[in-house]
Amino acid sequence: MTKVSMTVNGKAVSGEVEGRTLLSAFLRDDLHLTGTHIGCDTSQCGACVVHVDGKAVKSCTMFAAEADGAEVATIEGQANKDGSLNVIQAAFKEHHGLQCGFCTPGMVMSAAALLKENPKPTEAEVRDYLEGNICRCTGYHNIVKAILAASGQDVPAVAAE
Amino acid sequence: MPKDGGIGASSKRREDLRFLTGRGKYTDDINLQNQTHAYFVRSDVAHGTINSIDTSAAEAMPGVLRVFTAKDFEAVGGIPCGWQITDRHGEVMQEPKHPVLAEGKVRHVGDPIAVVVAETQAQARDAGEALDIDITELPAVIDMRDALKDGATKVHDDLTSNLCYDWGFVEENRDAVDEAIKGAHHVTTLELTNNRLVANPMEPRVAVGDYDFSTDEHTLYTTSQNPHVIRLLMGAFVLGIPEHKLRVVAPDVGGGFGTKIFHYAEEAFCTFAAKEIGRPVKWTSSRSEAFMSDAHGRDHVTKIELALDKDGNFLALRTDTLANMGAYLSTFAPSVPTWLHGTLMAGNYKTPLIYVNVKAVFTNTVPVDAYRGAGRPEATFQLERVVDKAAREMGIDPVELRRKNFITEFPYATPVAVEYDTGDYHATMDKLLEMSDHAGFDTRAAESKKNGKLRGFGISHYIEACGIAPSNLVGQLGARAGLYESATVRVNATGSISVMTGSHSHGQGHETSFAQVVADMIGIDESQIDIVHGDTAKTPMGMGTYGSRSIAVGGSAMVKATEKIINKAKKIAAHLLEASDADIELKDGAFSVAGTDKSVAWGDVTLAAYVPHNYPLEDIEPGLEETAFYDPANFTYPSGGYGCEVEVDPETGKVTVLGFYAADDFGNIVNPMIVEGQVHGGLAQGIGQALLENCAYDAEGQILSGSYMDYAMPRADDLPMFNVDHSCITPCTHNPLGVKGCGEAGAIGSPPALVNAVIDALQRGGHDVTHIDMPLSPDRVWAAMNG
Amino acid sequence: MYNFEINRPSTIADAVKALASDEAQALGGGQTLIPTLKQRLASPETLVSLTGIDEMKGICVDDDGRLCVGGATIHADVAADGRYPALSAMASHIGDPAVRNRGTIGGSIANNDPAACYPAAVLASNATVVTNTREIDADDYFQGMFTTALEEGEIVTEVKFPVPEVANYQKFVQPASRFALVGVFVAKFSDGVRVAVTGASEDGVFRWTDAEAALSDNFSADALEGLSVSADGMMSDLHGSAAYRAHLVKVMTGRAVTPAA
């Protein structure tokens, strides 16, 4: 067992981990931050995306020991300080960018990383950036819309009422 | 004008706050005190005899509590099948035993042989590898045609063959159909496969079993679409636990799409083992494990023939299908290629004579059962493909050929035993053509040609049957369960309401849309209403969510229960207002006496019900809580016109979906935003089936696409923005909301539209290609173009 | 996964020392190795993480004008660099954004997956693979799928790319994994054209020398007319037959030449 220390959502944490302990397992099992989800075992679905030192990574494809000393951000730390939804989360709700919610944490974390790199992405750039996040419910339509809306760009109304 | 609340409003989902902040509670997020972990050791061969299992080395490994094999389950039942088909000869289907853990033989890759329970997941898996299992591999039958040959290896030694049943529908029409086809002016024939799919909800399955010896109560937390069904099947047929000692909880569930309807061995195992071990037992599927243990979908091989007269009128339809059951009968597997498939073969057309034959076949593959659409996509695909092919063969515009044969008068009794209550197929076709700028297609095609691409447009027009019912009819058809739904409306003293529903939401947003219905009926704010679901200890016996049934069946139960509440509340209000029941009106959350300004608020009435000081105790009981069970009189019949515009790269065969258009008639709509989301998701899965997804086996029964490395899930960049419309409305005539169901439509209507579009593109490009089997991957399209 | 220790050295020297043990294995970004470990297809006693070695990170241009990419440099950094545009463009489409934030050039070419993108870039660019002990020409480095010239314990510390006059990489993706079903990297230098193909061959990345000769004479897609690639030795699977892959090699080469020219 190795001792690891890191900052998660602004809070210093530490724990004892095996070499094989994945960052995702450390977050879920040791820190009880169960918003980070595991949807595959081949590094493709992206339900586990978190930020490590400001960069989006798949927490199921990184060992906890490799995050020693790092700044980690997860879905649990994304809301505004007053508890209200941040602009991306709010756009997902407004535009129905989630259904079962399982891929959602990874989607929100990837969207945050995208908008940091590219504050006004085109639809094609959003779709391209989501290559590593699989959603089975939404057909991506409303996820793409939500991310465009979160970037401050105009999108059509939610439904043809 | 968009509404801002109640029925018809795009209310934002109340579920979203927890899902967007990581506070969702999925089954894998549940960790009980003192919990242990199960690892399933599964067969890596498709067929074999288990000679011996030596557990001693595994049992000596660190952290191991116990190793279970089939002999631990000798006193326990097998996994039951929920539907018995009677075949065309009057024989009931062959129904093999489906043990919790393999007994003597393994019959598919992934068949569970043994389970290690240990302190940690890693220890359980480490020990699983230390099991010494001696298996003699046997020849496997994978292809259905091979499985039906004389002398084929049998999947089950105790059955007479690999044929589960030979179903004919409507059997009495068989000869007349043959006759009509023989004498027809034109017969279009098409042979096709409906590719095997894996449902792949993003949340893999999980089960956590718990047992409290002090109360003799079992609890199972599981990723299910229907916890009451699991309690009934597992309690009554597998483990022998009476309902009052068995609680099944399906908390937040990360998508289902059918594959979480069924009762699985892992659920029975964790429930059973928790008592044996005396500690909670948890199993979490990996994605790779899901590919070999979640029931698969589709997998039909079909020959369809459509007979037409010289004017293009449909005369008769005959279809012969081989339907793969896999190695065991999953919960509702037998019903999918029969009652959910044969009854839909009329489509939107007034074909007078139809005969459907389905042979269900056992193979050494993972069991196949319902997947989004379940039988209806298979029916729609073959029908809408053969109609398109007929149009091309006869030189008739595919739109016109469909219009010529559309059913226009309702109710309409089809020759395949169902009665469509409402529909307006010309309206949805009109809408589709308008939305997709069908008139401008030629200009766009010319533009593509300039860029070296082939452009095509394909349509399909589907019929769906949702909310399978009524129970007495489906009982005659072989269902071993009822198909009603339930709701309890519990009004609290201060007027807030808890609605306990037997439906289960795993992405559909019931907590929002169901609240809209009740709020609308009473005239109070949606925030006053909570929807409770997913726990047999809290909700009345209900059948769960599948087959696009929740709003039509579960919603109707809720309406019925709410009507009872309103009727009783009116009596209370009448007492308070010193008026007659008949004069009481409920509007905007207040009861008033008709024609007067006398009124009493909702909250005052509910308070009176629970603090019955001024109350007609001699006439009515205190309290305000009502339950209703709703058993529909008929299916609901959504329909719609779907169009797909594609571009094919002739050099590589790659198909790009440029536009997808869906004009649906779902009847009345409760929450348009949610309905559109359901259609988007269905379209993605249908396009996925048509273009990307394929669960392939090799000849030895190994899964070739057993992970996301080879099973192509649709990604954001595979899909366009969708253009969906639901303004064509013919309300359902037999449920109180006039609703039909929208969950599966997208997956039903889209595959034929896409394939028709690709064939259109290729033929416009001068290629003599009349069919390509799904998925239309680049290599297949290229191979078809190059002969 | 089987359990192992993780060693996180901060210098190449320490990493080499740690890898001297028989049961030790190098860990780059882990984007291929970790899924492999999850399947229990490898059982190292120690994983030596190379991601904490600063001297193996970063991109610079050497005196010969070569773009020198540290072995532990992540794909995202190469994508953002831009001094060798075709290389950056290629790196910007490896895996997905999260994978590009972890995966490294050294890890990719040490693994030499037959469908990976980097081997095509390294081979077409005639790059030099620098290790802790020596420099290896690209032509000598790749030795068949999952096989390289690396000795046990040898680490790719840097890759030096001569920057071509023009270059382009075309990837036709396998729809599930998003690896290359066929990827072709074309690089035109003053003394000739190199064409490297990934994803297609059972022998891993290879140079299509017929195309190189034709394109060296006439750098246009027309020069490929009349050439064909044999399906013999091409991979064949669920996603494409050998004949299809052979066909795609030519199509993708033509497309790489057209924008490059």
Image (cartoon, rainbow, N blue to C red):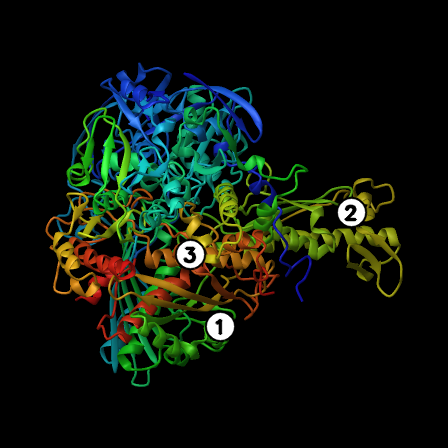
Q: Residues within 10 Å of mark 3 (few under 14, many from 20)?
A: many
Q: Can residue B468 be seen in this view?
A: no
Q: Position of residue C99 (x, y in %)?
A: 38, 40
- Amino acid type, residue under disc 3 in the picture: Ala
Quarter residue C74 falls in: top left
Q: Which chain carries label 1?
A: B
Q: How crowded is mark 2: few (under 14 residues within 10 Å), some or many (20 or more)?
A: few
> To which residue does mark 2 refer?
B620
- Amino acid type, residue under disc 2 in the picture: Ile
Q: Position of residue B568 (x, y in %)?
A: 75, 51
Q: Mark 2 lies on which chain?
A: B
> To which residue does mark 3 refer?
B684
- Amino acid type, residue under disc 1 in the picture: Met
Q: State which quarter of the image contains the C terminus of chain B.
A: bottom left
Point out the tag, 3 or 1, that comes first from the N-terminus.
Answer: 1
Report the mark closest to the observer, 3 or 2: 3
What's the residue at 23%, 50% (across, down)?
C238
Q: State which quarter of the image contains the N terminus of chain B.
A: bottom right
Q: Where is residue C22 in the image (x, y as percent from the top left)?
A: 22, 19
Disc 3 with disc 2 on a shared chain? yes
Q: How crowded is mark 1: few (under 14 residues within 10 Å), some or many (20 or more)?
A: some
